[in-house]
Amino acid sequence: MRPVRAADAPAILAAHRSAADMARQGTVTTPAEAEEQVAWLLAADRRATAIADGSDHLVGLVAITVDPKNRSGWFFYWLHAEHRGLGLGARAAAAVAERALRPVADGGWGLERLELGHRANNLASGAVARAAGFVHEGTERGKFLIDDERVDVLTYGRLRTDPVPDTAGLPWGP
Ligand SMILES: CC(C)(COP(=O)(O)OP(=O)(O)OC[C@H]1O[C@@H](n2cnc3c(N)ncnc32)[C@H](O)[C@@H]1OP(=O)(O)O)[C@@H](O)C(=O)NCCC(=O)NCCS
């Protein structure tokens, strides 16, 4: 795990091209859109962490859009399709949530609340959220219109004071 950098744009494009469900993670279909996406991820109010393989090549992302006034953050994640189902999403999300909620004095990012939402039929996303210590908080009924069907969104939150999950976080690089 390491911060996202500008040079990750081609890997981000490859990940977006790897699965149809990536369309809901932003429009990244060309190298130019991938560069725009990296610039968006590197904005001041965002913390974007790459899940990198042994060659330091980005294969996934866990990111937070920070709301400094409320010391909270909107949490999101994705994996290149070839790297899913290996526990990486859960372990990366656990590591980023732990660091985000850790006080600044202890080397963390000082947030006190993290939140996320996922479509009710995205079972993998819910499993990742729970593995990273998030608690189901509610349901936004019929939030999205997808293929002419209204789809519920399940909302999750994790407070600094919530129990730490058992999930072993992925290690941070230098
Ligand atoms: C959601 C996503 C990040 C999961 O990443 P992953 O690395 O494949 O997930 P993991 O291997 O860590 O699995 C975590 C849990 O999800 C479960 N899971 C994984 N894929 C699943 C699937 N297709 N259906 C049901 N459960 C699934 C695993 O069994 C595991 O549960 P467990 O801990 O109870 O065994 C990945 O599927 C993805 O990138 N999806 C597209 C983008 C997306 O939907 N992001 C979330 C937006 S809210």
Image (cartoon, helix red, strand yellow):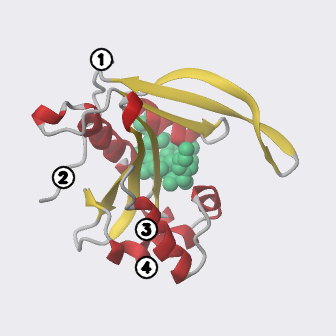
**Other-residue count near label 3 (Cα within 10 Å), few / some / many at <14 / 14–19 / ≥20:** some
Of the two numbered discs 2 and 3 on the same chain, state the one appearing first in sequence: 3
- Residue located beneath label 3 in the image: 39
Amino acid type of the residue that numbered disc 4 sits on in the rendered structure: Pro
> Is residue 13 in view?
no
Q: Whole-Å distance between the Cαs marked 2 and 3?
A: 22 Å
Amino acid type of the residue that numbered disc 2 sits on in the rendered structure: Trp
- Residue located beneath label 4 in the image: 10
Residue appearing at x 40%, y 57% in the figure: 61
Where disc 1 sits, the SS reads: loop
- Residue located beneath label 1 in the image: 161
Amino acid type of the residue that numbered disc 1 sits on in the rendered structure: Thr
- The N terminus: image quadrant: bottom left
**Other-residue count near label 4 (Cα within 10 Å), few / some / many at <14 / 14–19 / ≥20:** some
Of the two numbered discs 2 and 4 on the same chain, state the one appearing first in sequence: 4
Q: CB of mark 1 within 8 Å of CB of mark 3?
A: no
Where disc 2 sits, the SS reads: loop
Q: Viewer-nearest of labels 4 and 3?
A: 3
Compared with 59, 142 (above or below) is above
Q: Viewer-nearest of labels 2 and 3?
A: 3
Q: Viewer-nearest of labels 1 and 2?
A: 1
**Other-residue count near label 1 (Cα within 10 Å), few / some / many at <14 / 14–19 / ≥20:** few
- Residue located beneath label 2 in the image: 172
Front one among 143 and 17: 143
